[in-house]
Image: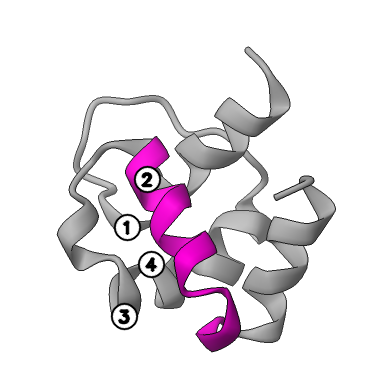
Amino acid sequence: MTRSVAFAMSFSMAAFAATEVPAAGTAEERSACEPDVRRFCKQAGTDEFVVLGCLKVNRTKLSKGCLKVLTDNGQ
């Protein structure tokens, strides 16, 4: 699994913990972006690529912690 796919999946899991997709990314990465995913990406559903795209579109509104996670993962 590539790092960007694992990274994207972590956001999906942060927002939608009830899904069957295995969690990826670190607990710190998930917790850093969970509030932003819930706030800006409710419409994204469980598709990890849609969640990542949503976060990238909302980059200027993200918390510093979540923005750092995006940057650290090449997004």
Q: Secondary structure at mark 4?
A: helix
User: How far separated are the C-alphas under marks 2 and 1?
Assistant: 5 Å
Q: Which residue is denoted by mark 4 in the rendering?
A: 37
Q: Secondary structure at mark 3?
A: helix
Q: Earlier in the sequence, mark 4 or mark 2?
A: 2
Which image quadrant: the N terminus?
A: top right
Structural crowding at the residue carrying mark 4, measured as other residues with C-alpha within 10 Å and reported as few (<14), some (14–19) or many (≥20): many
Q: Amino acid at mark 1?
A: Ala
On residue 15, which mark appears? Answer: 1
Residue 4: quadrant of the picture = top right
Residues under numbered marks 2 and 1 in contact, where contact means CB atoms less than 8 Å apart: yes
* Viewer-side residue, 40 vs 38: 40
Q: Which residue is denoted by mark 3 in the rendering?
A: 39
Q: Which residues are magenta?
A: 49-62
Q: Earlier in the sequence, mark 1 or mark 4?
A: 1
Spot occupied by residue 63 in the image (x, y as percentages of width and height)? 60, 85
